[in-house]
Image (cartoon, rainbow, N blue to C red):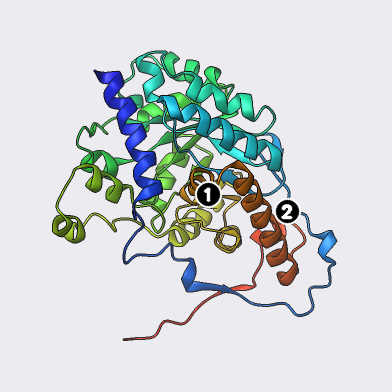
Amino acid sequence: MKRRTTSSRKRDHVRLTVREDVAFRSKTNGFDRWEFVHNALPEIDLDEVDTGTEFLGRPLAMPLMVSCMTGGYREAERINRRLAEACEEHRIAMGVGSQRQAMEDTTFHASYTAARAGAPTVPLVGNIGAPELARMKDLSPVLRLAEMIRADGFAVHLNPLQEFLQPEGKTHFRGVLAAVERLVKELPVPVIVKEIGAGIAPDVALRLIDAGVSIIDVAGAGGTSWAGVEILRGGGSNAETAQNPFWDWGIPTADAVIGAAKLRDRLPRLTIIGSGGIAGPMDGAKAVALGADLFASARPLLTVLMERGPKALSQELSSWKRGLRGIMFLLGTPTVAALRGTRRIIQRPTVDP
């Protein structure tokens, strides 16, 4: 019964994120408050612009990660394989969805291993939830999950809001920080700590840094509302759904990136992933300009794959790279490092109502 429950939940998540409107309603990712300052004298040629970077010891053609989405049910094998093949083709990073189901039995292990089969040379990130990690006396199951997909890094996702709203949610979050600290010491690959759409505040990021974490995915608000997904799964009435105060809960992604970037004084080698509402290269470029090392996207790319197929996904990723390259050219920033250090981004003035 447990396997069936976990697997059906994973299937529900993909179905709802693709078919239903689960975006934040009145809250944005925050990037709309920022704009680039056009550089009419970029003093570089377009063909000099290099969108490449490095992540987890592997080269990337652009600072993009297809973020952790799915796994743990039969159809997920095909989805992860196709996502992985697109990542391999375009040399971008990928994360698998929560591997919790893989700890329960081996039925759907192929839904996770398909990712490495499809993407043998790009960075691949494993994934487990904080409540599962906190309850482990022995961390060897996480090591096995990492080995299963030959992971280059391993993500622990912090999702207290989702667990609170999930009908079968696990709200055991005591001891998570200590468990993360142990994992950093014991796992042979880097540990990434991420939210899933409610954001990581600077004080939380600082506690993670003090625990030894050097890669943080802020995963802010403004894209998919996982609160909304769970509210819909719970089967509330339309009126209850519309009025639920948790639908728009969270820290906008832009604010979370800026807050985390200020902590580089504490840890210069801190790697920041900006995700949450990254709908295209403009959002991604703004995330980097505000301090992220790379950006990540999930639902927009999954939707293209599910609705239009692998060829359309490949075309979409090519479009993202062209867009990012154009933005960098128009700012006069020939490298990703130069984009991250640019001063050609300003906050739009607010207008009082």
- Look at 53% across and 18% down and name the residue there: 148
| Label tally | 2
Give the label on residue 304, or none: 1
Q: Is residue 138 visible?
A: yes
**SS for tag 1?**
helix
Give the label on residue 32, or none: none
Q: Nearer the viewer, residue 72 or 266?
A: 72
Q: Quadrant of residue 309?
A: top right
Q: Nearer the viewer, residue 256 or 303?
A: 303
- Look at 63% across and 28% down and name the residue there: 118
Quadrant for the N terminus in the image:
top left
Image x and y of residue 159, in percent: 33, 41
Callout 1–callout 2 Cβ contact below 8 Å: no
Quadrant for the C terminus in the image:
bottom left
Can you identify the residue that label 2 sits on? 51
Image x and y of residue 31, in percent: 49, 66
Query: N-terminal of the two: label 1 or label 2?
Result: 2
Q: CA distance from mark 1 to mark 2?
A: 23 Å
Callout 2, which amino acid?
Answer: Thr
Q: Residues within 10 Å of mark 2 (few under 14, many from 20)?
A: many
The residue sitting at the front extreme is 308
From the viewer's perspective, is residue 205 above or below residue 285? Answer: above
Callout 1, which amino acid?
Answer: Val
From the viewer's perspective, is residue 33 above or below residue 158? Answer: below
Image x and y of residue 163, in percent: 26, 38
